[in-house]
Image (cartoon, rainbow, N blue to C red):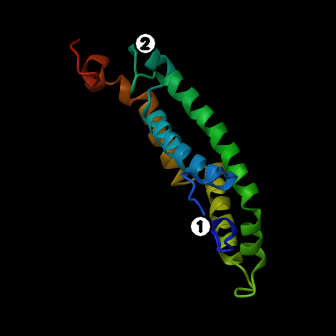
């Protein structure tokens, strides 16, 4: 029997890259957008108020307050879209987590209710301006209105230059 008429299975040729999937895109998109939101959120938390930032020429990593606000808002819109896509592509997973499987007929409803309770508590704390949510707002207000206007943190001091 010659090689042209062989019935032996051919070995699959490995592909260099896997084909594009929405699942991988959703996971990487959410994972890579999160640190941008985290960094811009922290910087905006400690940033001086707009008037103070503009008058002092305040910048971090080449962006002024307006630039950081734009980056944060744009990244937030992208993040929301990616999270929506992530939920959509993983709907079967959510269904099995909530509805159960033969191995776990009760599903993971306790975890879902706990997460819902934590989010609800967070919203309630913010709405009632109770700690620790109020502490976060107090800290942000301190940085926006007081920290950057004291003599110890005058523009020449905190940027490393002379008056």
Q: Residue at x 68, y 77 (%)?
A: 108
Q: Residue at x 62, y 67 (%)?
A: 3
> Which element carries disc 2, helix, strand or loop?
helix
- Depth check: 127 or 112 in front? 112
Determine crowd level at label 1: few under 14, some 14-19, many 20+ residues with C-alpha closer than 10 A: few
- Quick check: 163 above or below 82? above
Residue on which disc 2 sits: 55
Q: Which quadrant holds the N terminus?
A: bottom right
Residue farthest along the left direction in this orientation: 162
Total of numbered circles in the picture?
2
Q: Which quadrant holds the C terminus?
A: top left
Using the rendered view, name the quadrant where residue 118 is placed.
Answer: bottom right
Picture coordinates of residue 121 (x, y %)?
Answer: 64, 61
Using the rendered view, name the quadrant where residue 88 is placed.
Answer: bottom right
Picture coordinates of residue 20 (x, y %)?
Answer: 65, 49
Q: Residue at x 54, y 52 (%)?
A: 16
> Which element carries disc 1, helix, strand or loop?
loop
- Depth check: 68 or 24 in front? 24
Q: Residue at x 69, y 51 (%)?
A: 22
Mark identifier at residue 11: 1
- Does label 2 or label 1 sit earlier along the sequence? 1
- Depth check: 41 or 13 in front? 13
């Amino acid at each position: 029997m010659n090689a042209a008429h062989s019935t032996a299975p051919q070995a699959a040729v490995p592909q260099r890259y896997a084909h594009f999937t929405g699942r991988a895109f959703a996971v990487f998109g959410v994972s890579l957008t999160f640190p941008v939101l985290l960094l811009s959120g922290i910087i905006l938390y400690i940033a001086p108020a707009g008037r103070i930032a503009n008058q002092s020429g305040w910048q971090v990593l080449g962006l002024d307050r307006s630039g950081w606000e734009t980056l944060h808002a744009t990244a937030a819109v992208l993040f929301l879209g990616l999270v929506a896509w992530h939920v959509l592509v993983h709907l079967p997973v959510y269904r099995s987590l909530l509805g159960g499987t033969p191995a776990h007929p009760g599903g993971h409803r306790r975890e879902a209710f706990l997460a819902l309770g934590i989010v609800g508590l967070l919203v309630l704390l913010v709405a009632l301006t109770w700690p620790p949510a109020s502490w976060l707002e107090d800290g942000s207000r301190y940085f926006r209105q007081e920290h950057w206007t004291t003599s110890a943190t005058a523009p020449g001091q905190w940027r490393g230059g002379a008056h």
